[in-house]
Amino acid sequence: MALLRLLLLLTPVCCALPTDGDLSPPITNLRLDPGNKRLTWDLSGNVSRIQCYVNGAVRDSEKNNRYCSLYVFPKCEAWNFTVHATVPSGKPFSAWIDYPRQEGNPRAAAEHLQCRVHDLHFLTCSWAVGAEAPRDVQYDFYLEDLSTTRKWPCPQYMEKEPGTHVQCRFANVSQLPNDEDQNRLFRLVVQGTSRHSRVPCSEIFTSLSQIEEFIAPNLTADCNKSLAVLQWQMSSHFTKTFEYELKIEEDSGVPIMQNNLSQESWILPNPGTFTVTIRAQGGQWSARQRFVCDPEDEARLYVWLIALTALLAVGAAILLCKKYSVLQKLFPPIPHMKVPTADNCVHENMIAWQPGTPTPEDCPVAEVQLVEGT
């Protein structure tokens, strides 16, 4: 009897056998096939309503009563993979395995592994040294794309005394795959090593869009006499669509709050002077920006334009007068000349001689005699 109990403890697959006296389980040889990403089994009886569970959560329904498709397989912590079925008698049947097999002290593995994408370009992961880790433990980090199995080792570590890695930073996440539908999964792994004992690894599974802390949007505002138009732009390497929260506070004290905005603009009646801040999907709030939209600004602009036009006109007239005076000095007017052949043009200083009038040579001349005095 003791030998039978020992054999049962050493069996890798645990099954809840039917209670109707039939010792032949309908599902046997439960196993994982990482290459095809399947949980498979051998079927030796009639069953119905087969479903697969991972750590107690439903993952998939069976395919052809032979396997369930899976997308994630752990490397560090053992997960429970269970198959539930119903036998012809209507009673439930379950078979399960734990994968992978645990080796080493789990309390020596890195603890509290956390990762975040921040400040648009950076991926930072941090962890704590295991509570029961060996004194010479060292941790190394890598990032794995589950769809391609491509890996990226950590380019930059931060250390804790005496030189144990406790943080990793990627300074340019734009080099990582950009997933259009935001569902690309990554495995983020911290592998421990020691000369004295085996140290299990630690891991988390996530998409980079799920752990991104969004930067604040870039906000601008334009106003006219009746409306204020707010516009903003958002940047991310992994997320294409956003929802925004917008806070507007008028100087009059009236708060305006808009949530779940999917567009990148907002129009509101001219509120005069107001303050705005915005964020995307729980990310960072932008700095408070104060805008002044005065309804009379447009009229004032026209007044200034008219005054400026008048001033320019006066200035132009003065310049023209000065320019004319200088030209007069440089280029004085040329006197008019009498055209000899023109009979009908008589100058005021000219005398016209009538026919028959004696010429100046025919005028009588008196002789004058000079007498010397004594």
Image (cartoon, helix red, strand yellow):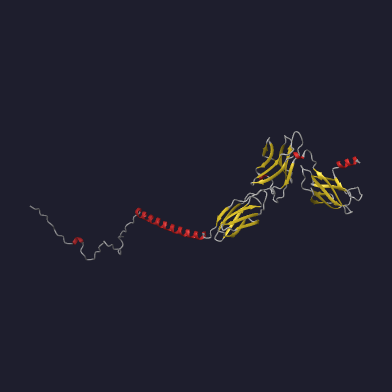
Question: Would you say residue 28 is visible in this rendering?
Answer: no
Q: Position of residue 134 (x, y in %)?
A: 74, 35
| Apparent side of residue 58 relative to residue 6 in the rendered image (left or right) | left
Q: Residue at x 87, y 42 (%)?
A: 8
**In front: 338, or 169?**
169
Identify whether 273 is placed above or below 41.
Answer: below
Identify whether 187 is placed above or below 339.
Answer: above
State the image quarter where residue 195 is shown: top right
**In front: 110, or 211?**
110
| Apparent side of residue 357 relative to residue 251 in the rendered image (left or right) | left
Image quadrant occupied by the N terminus = top right
| Apparent side of residue 332 relative to residue 108 in the rendered image (left or right) | left
Q: Residue at x 50, y 61 (%)?
A: 299
**In front: 140, or 284?**
284
Name the residue at the top extreme. 195
Q: Position of residue 80 (x, y in %)?
A: 80, 46
Q: Position of residue 327 (x, y in %)?
A: 37, 54
Q: Position of residue 243 (x, y in %)?
A: 66, 54
| Apparent side of residue 338 relative to residue 136 in the rendered image (left or right) | left
Total residue callouts = 0
Question: Would you say residue 231 is visible in this rendering?
Answer: yes
